[in-house]
Image: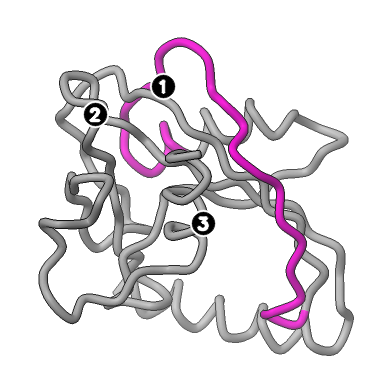
Amino acid sequence: MASTVLTAAHRVRRIWWRLRRPRTFGVKVLLLHPGDPGRFLAVRHSYVDHERWALPGGRYRPARESAESAARREVGEELDVAVVGQLRRLTTVRSTAEGKRDTITIFAGTAAAGAVTTSVELREARWFRTDLSDLPTGDPVSRWLRTALTSHRS
């Protein structure tokens, strides 16, 4: 039921974005495993792109919080885990792909624990190798996840 409501709300929001073309800000986090920095956490959302592996993250308002604070908040809300130590800014990307003017900041950081609890926003969360060698064949991956992994390797 919650997934259906979130999906419907997301569709309405996308129509509004196409009409208004708002300026939005978002964060994504390449969350590294605390015991093995060669692994990261990928998620599947419950309300959009159900099959695509992506990064945890979400929206924020720069007047109210920094991108780094938002990244920590989103990881806590979506996965019930903290980020320890520093977050490293990997890149900032501007996009108009969804009909809005979006600025997305991608960070890398280490999870406080290997065990996570997914929120209603997430369908699944799984640790993968940063080279994606253990990703099931044919599973789609978001462009932001690929961007994060490329930036992380550099």
Residue 36 in percent (x, y) is at 18, 25
> Which numbered disc, 2 or 1, marks the residue closer to the eye?
2
Q: Earlier in the sequence, mark 2 or mark 1?
A: 2
Magenta residues, as a range? 75-99
- Residue 24 figure quarter: bottom right
Mark 1 highlights which residue?
83
Q: Is residue 50 left or right of residue 66?
A: left
Q: How many marks?
A: 3
Q: Are marks 3 and 2 in contact (CB under 8 Å)?
A: no
Q: Earlier in the sequence, mark 3 or mark 2?
A: 2
**As shown in the figure, which amino acid type bears the numbered disc 1?**
Val
**As shown in the figure, which amino acid type bears the numbered disc 2?**
His
Q: Is residue 83 left or right of residue 33?
A: right
Mark 2 highlights which residue?
33
Q: Is 93 part of what is drawn in magenta?
A: yes
Residue 138 in percent (x, y) is at 18, 81
Residue 140 in percent (x, y) is at 30, 76
Q: Relative to residue 90, is residue 87 depicted above or below?
A: above
Q: Residue at x 76, y 76 (%)?
A: 96
Q: Nearer the viewer, residue 46 or 131?
A: 131
Query: What is the spatial separation of the Cα atoms under label 2 and label 1, in whole angstroms?
Result: 10 Å
Q: Secondary structure at mark 1?
A: strand
Q: Earlier in the sequence, mark 3 or mark 1?
A: 1
Q: Secondary structure at mark 3?
A: helix
- Residue 120 figure quarter: bottom left
Mark 3 highlights which residue?
147
Q: Are marks 2 and 1 in contact (CB under 8 Å)?
A: no
Q: Residue at x 25, y 47 (%)?
A: 118
**As shown in the figure, which amino acid type bears the numbered disc 3?**
Thr
Query: What is the spatial separation of the Cα atoms under label 3 and label 1, in whole angstroms?
Result: 20 Å
Q: Residues within 10 Å of mark 2 (few under 14, many from 20)?
A: many
